[in-house]
Image (cartoon, rainbow, N blue to C red):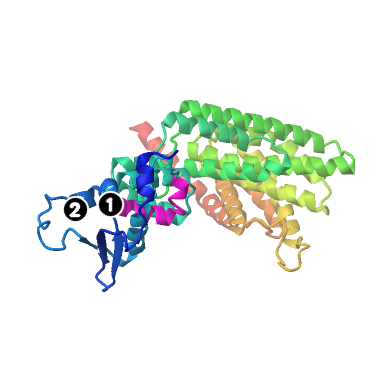
Amino acid sequence: MEPRDNQAQASYTFGDRSSSDIVVRLRNEEGRDDWIYCHCKILSEKSQYFADRLSDKWPTCKILDSRYCVEVICQESDYDHHINLLRLLYVVSDDVHEDNLCHNVKSALGILCVAKELSCPQIVTACVKYLEAVPWEEGEEEEILRIVPRIGSEAEPILARLQPVDQSAVTEIFVSAFRFATSSPLLPLGDIKSSAQEQIEYMITEDDDAPLLIADEEIKLEVKECVKSLFVRFFQCLEAISFKPLESEAISQKGSFRMVLSDLSWAFQILTKMEVVRDFVVTWVDTSEKLVKVVEQLETSVAETIEIRVKVIEVTSKVVEAIGYGTVILPTAKRLQMVKLWLPFVRNTKPLVDSVVTEDEENGSVRQKIDGEIWQALESSFVSIILALPSADQAEILTEWLSKNGLYPDLTEAFEVWCYRSKVAKRRLGLLGGEEEENGMS
């Protein structure tokens, strides 16, 4: 059996002129004027605004017909929302669920604004519950941010999903994401891993907003441990492909090797933002000799091999840049070793990469393409490293480069600086020596 209030409410029909005892005259500045037939009992019970307008205390209550016609002025954009709200006053109750009252975000937002304006608490609550629970489109989210804060505290639950979280929660999700981003999940999870890597970089990048996370020592330690585990996988893959496995095994192992190289390239960017790249650089330098030897033994006519070379160069370019510009300080012998190992490697790899054309003739693009900026960065980094070496070592490197007819990388800048320094060396150092003798005599 229905409650008595619901039974009474059911006896009223929205817009029924024959039983109506009040007209809501809805008007706007564009000249639209609608007469909506309603019932005082419904309006007074569900809306404080109408309760006040229809009460004996309202200033114009004694004027003829003023109690039987309530004028409401609204904007054209809110017109339908006012009509929908009046209709909802006839159906809203504790027994009616929110999904039966609201049908989409735009409508719910519009009705919410009108309900707040006309003091309809039941409608406000229903709209808030609906908007808090349903998904939003990006444009709807911006509209919610524009409107909801003006509604008041009763609408705060709507914004719960947009509130900033505790820093400890940010740290936990960052660490979990970083562990996953440096793991080796099954192939179907590759897209999720890529997304994790993108979001980690976004979290620590300063753009229009401050970074979501500022890495403290604890976070940096966790990140470095994950990268150590990544290097363990790298060494395992390097060892596996060095033994010339069967063709079926080789394809799988090369795929794993490419993946871990991609992860290392990405990890270096994160370490750079956190200013903790030294361990990475030192590890890469120490393994460079074996790495170059293994990769050069792979069959260069195989596309997978060239892809591996590309990935190796992407990581190496970041490492030599850190060395060349003094981000990581290494002994002379280590810097000289890096030049002697990687200069011939990149020189031999560039024409291979440039000559490999995609099998997809529609695009006509290079399959294992390296961004031109990487080649340029490698060239600049090598020049910086070479110019910081002892002059005799510079001469040896430049002699070898000239014997190759000046092939990539272009070391012209290093050659010009070496010529100048060498020509004026005796005079410059002689003057310095003379100053020292004068200082000694005095």
Q: Is residue 406 visible?
A: yes
| Circles 1, 2 touching at the beta carbon (< 8 Å) | yes
Q: Which residue is mark 1?
A: 43
Residue 133 falls within the magenta-colored stretch: no
**Quick check: 31 above or below 371?**
below
What secondary structure is the magenta-colored segment mainly? helix
- At 35% from the left and 48% from the top, the residue drawn is 9
Magenta residues (range): 98-117
Amino acid marked by disc 2: Leu
Residue 115 falls within the magenta-colored stretch: yes
Q: Would you call the spot at circle 2 few (<14 residues within 10 Å), some (14-19), or many (20 or more)?
A: many
Q: Looking at this rendering, what residue extends furthest in the bottom direction?
A: 31
Give the camera-side residue of 157 and 371. 157
- Residue 407 at what x, y percent from top left? 69, 59
Q: Which residue is mark 2?
A: 54
SS at mark 1 in the image: helix
- Residue 147 at what x, y percent from top left? 33, 52
Q: Looking at this rendering, what residue extends furthest in the right direction?
A: 246
Query: Would you say 338 lies left or right of 130 here?
Result: right
